Amino acid sequence: RKMVMTRRGALIVLEGCDKAGKSTQAKMMLDSVTKTGKGIRLMNFPDRTTTIGGIIDQYLRKQIELKDEAVHLLFSANRWELVPEIKATLARGESIVVDRYAYSGIAFSGAKGMDLEWCRAPDVGLPKPDAVIYLNLDKKIASQRGDYGQERYENIEFQEKVKDIFWKLKDDSYWHVIEASRPIEVVHQDCYKIVLETIQRKEHQPIELLWK
Ligand code: TMP
Ligand code: MG
């Protein structure tokens, strides 16, 4: 009797500062990978549709105030509450492209001056991404891409601090830095190659745990 080797999906994270094009690239990836017949879906953090996500949403829209530590833990809890869904999706062979993950959690809280190790602790043990695609955008070009909105953290000085911390978190063993100032389609082709290669390379590998 032939043994059936079930393939798992890959967990791909898109990170980068605001205006880098994460959401655009995530949607393009969904279309391209779907066309190949492989299963893939999008997720994003914060996921504002859950109860915890609703509190985060109010905080980001400046409707409520929360202590820095408390909101940091809510962002982490918002990831943990979706871990069962992430695991189940990967286990049935579907890949996931995630717009932001624990790295944003550390980078944005760290940019407020919070201790980076303290910030990392609650996310230790999350499913480890098979690849992180970091969309790198020069700050001059980011500012030309239009005004920031009204949400918390949406200003250039803060985003520069965020970028410095992303740079500290970068782990070349699974991070890919992509220059995001190039045309959207060119950026997409680079991201697409990474995603396809990662799906193939990881299909029979166990999911690792982040920072463990
Ligand atoms: P969004 O613009 O991708 O919806 O993200 C909302 C904001 O939340 C964005 O400024 C980044 C920030 N953020 C954190 O502060 N901590 C986190 O853990 C995550 C995922 C996002
Ligand atoms: Mg935003």
Image (cartoon, rainbow, N blue to C red):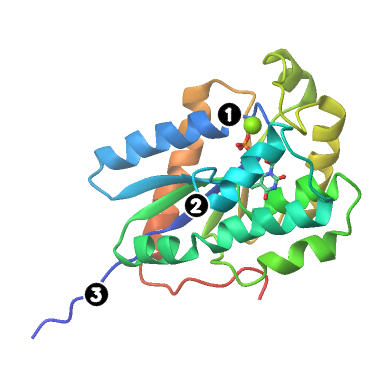
Single out the mark in the foreground, 3 or 1: 1
Q: In 3D space, how far apart are the residues under numbered discs 2 and 3 (Cα atoms)?
A: 22 Å
Q: In 3D space, how far apart are the residues under numbered discs 3 and 1 (Cα atoms)?
A: 36 Å
State the image quarter where residue 64 is shown: top right
Give the mark, 2 or 3, whose residue is nearer the N terminus: 3
Query: Residue 66's x, y, as percent?
Result: 79, 47
Q: Is residue 177 visible?
A: no
Is 28 left, or right, of 175 in this rendering? left
Which residue does the image show at 62% across and 39% down from the upper left?
A: 57
Tell me the tag on residue 21: 1
State the image quarter where residue 34 is shown: top left
Q: Is label 3 in contact with label 1 (beta carbons under 8 Å)?
A: no
Q: Is residue 38 visible?
A: yes
Name the residue carrying label 2. Answer: 12
Name the residue carrying label 3. Answer: 5
Query: Residue 22's x, y, as percent?
Result: 56, 34
